[in-house]
Image (spheres, rainbow, N blue to C red):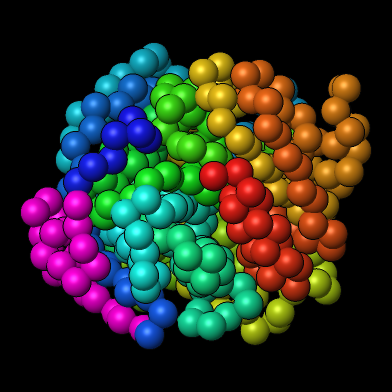
Amino acid sequence: MVSSLSFKVSLTTLALGLSTFVSNAIAQTTFSQFNCTEFFVPVDISAQTVKLNLGNPHNQSELSGLVTRMTYLNSTIVDEVTVGPSMVNATFNIWSELCVPGGFKEDGIIEFTIHGSTENHTYFNFGKESPFNYAEAALKAGHAIFTYDGLGAGKSDKPDGIQDVQIGTETAVAIALVEKLPSLLSFGKVIGVGHAHGSVIMIGMLAERGDLFNATVLTSIAPVLFGVTEGLAAMDVKIAAEVVPERYHGLESSYAVSGGLTNDQITFYHFPFFDPEVFLEMQSGRELITLGVLLTLPQNGQALNYTNPLLVVTGDRDYFMCGGNCNVTDGDFPSRPAAVAGLFPAVNDFTVHIPENTGHFVNYHFSAPQTFTFIQQWIGGRV
């Protein structure tokens, strides 16, 4: 797929080209160095999901009880509520943004990003001219970058948070969006960039379609989520509509948010190596996670047919992925992030980068500018 991208769209007609399949209003922002266009993409999917015997929580106590059971040692809650396989056949509107640097060539590089849970596209696009803005780092390297709000997040559709927003639908949406990229812009190579749960989705994509990306960057990831139960407990998830009514009023109770500032610091940050103002701004805009996602988190499977270069970037103090200590051996691997190589047995070009004094939100620590430079230099050396 990555070798047959032939549809031609010039930058001057980008917004017009998008209108051939994009619905609703288009917003366009132009800076001297790059052009960004916002739009909704109607995505048709047929996704394998899991039928869950579970209704929306009636109150916060019921939600807390359910999440507590998920964190039990040897928890069986997933087996208890799983009925069997199911399918979701639907069209979802996905909010997206494409940013293209000036002078972008038809054989240039586009980066396709997937944010994690409790986030939206702004994880990669935080603030104009901010040291924590990954998108601007990519644009300065001469790359186009595609970001989007995942299903059930941001401005994208928010269907049933138990039966519809699951790992299977998220994966299908992401694959469909990658397939639409040639209709947006002429380019030569596409790089996948995932964060946390977005990296989990990307692993699933590559297990299904090994030819999607010319190179892949997985951030905040380990082969097994060593700290997921502790992290989930520390998040203290709340019914979103009850604790953030100004943003989520009317949303069903299967949509949750993290409990508050302390919860976010424990799970996503490593004190004191982050900017308090960024921390407060991100928490004030805290995003959603659904019960459907929490109950269908996969055991990462092998992507047997992916053969292109792979970079793993995980902070040394990632609480979710490593229980707060990523620099420990994992079998024959020197670190837990390095063990991701076991999921990609056909990859010969595998690189690991572990930023110091960095928690789960790699992009929001003081190490971010150096991390962005490492990633862009790695991409430049591989494709």
Answer with the quarter of the image where residue 237 lies. Answer: bottom right
Q: Residue at x 73, y 67 (%)?
A: 370
Spot occupied by residue 287 in the image (x, y as percentages of width and height):
47, 62
Q: Residue at x 33, y 22 (%)?
A: 48
**Quarter occupied by the C terminus:** top right
Q: Is 121 displayed left or right of 195 in the figure?
A: left
Instruction: Using the rendered image of the protein, determine whether residue 106 is visible from the camera's viewpoint.
Output: yes
| Between 78 and 141, the one nearer to me in the picture | 141
Q: Residue at x 61, y 35 (%)?
A: 309
Spot occupied by residue 299 in the image (x, y as percentages of width and height):
60, 24
Q: Is 190 displayed left or right of 151 in the figure?
A: right
Spot occupied by residue 69 in the image (x, y as percentages of width and height):
63, 34
Give the vertical position of 112 relative to 356 (above or below).
above
| Between 256 and 228, the one nearer to me in the picture | 228
Instruction: Using the rendered image of the protein, determine whether residue 299 is visible from the camera's viewpoint.
Output: no
Give the vertical position of 17 relative to 188 (above or below).
below
**Quarter occupied by the N terminus:** top left
| Residue 115 is inside the magenta segment | no
Spot occupied by residue 128 in the image (x, y as percentages of width and height):
49, 82
Q: Residue at x 29, y 79 (%)?
A: 29
**Stretch of the chain drawn in magenta:** 8-31
| Between 358 and 102, the one nearer to me in the picture | 102
| Residue 19 is inside the magenta segment | yes
The mark total stands at: 0
Give the vertical position of 120 relative to 281 (above or below).
above
| Between 108 and 166, the one nearer to me in the picture | 108
Answer with the quarter of the image where residue 280 lies. Answer: bottom right
